[in-house]
Amino acid sequence: MNKAELIEAVSKNCCTKKEAQTAVESVFDAIKGSLKKKDPVAISGFGTFKVKETKARTGRNPKTGESIQIPAKKKIAFRASKDLKALLN
């Protein structure tokens, strides 16, 4: 399901397509804003999004075998809730 399909599904259940689009985008903006501040986002019955930081490390260029420095960075992790896992299994 992509964003347009999600908006369509929400609009069928509650409101017009334009209102559904505003609601979906508002939820995504709230999640992004929270993650930007490094705050986890826990959605009961669905899962938790949080920011993880990776340390700088040394890697190898696969083409030349040369050692390269890989910088530290942040990434987003998602952990599904027990309810969501149970739904799938």
Image (cartoon, rainbow, N blue to C red):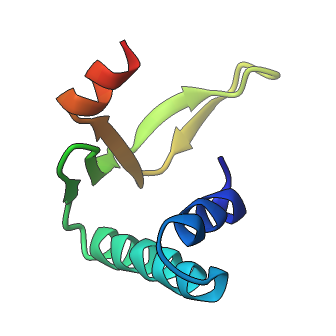
Residue 69 placement, left or right of 76: right
Residue 6 placement, left or right of 48: right
Vertical relation: 21 (above or below) 86: below
**Residue at the location (48% across, 32% down)?**
58
Vertical relation: 48 (above or below) 89: below
Measuring from the top left, give residue 16's x and y in whole percent.
60, 84
Measuring from the top left, give residue 2's x and y in whole percent.
68, 54
**Residue at the location (66% across, 65% down)?**
8
Instruction: Give whichever of 69, 37 is nearer the camera.
Output: 37
Instruction: Give whichever of 37, 79 is nearer the camera.
Output: 79
Residue 48 placement, left or right of 65: left
Measuring from the top left, give residue 18's x and y in whole percent.
64, 87
Quadrant housing residue 46:
top left
Residue 71 placement, left or right of 56: right
Measuring from the top left, give residue 89's x and y in whole percent.
36, 12
Toward the top, the furthest residue is 89
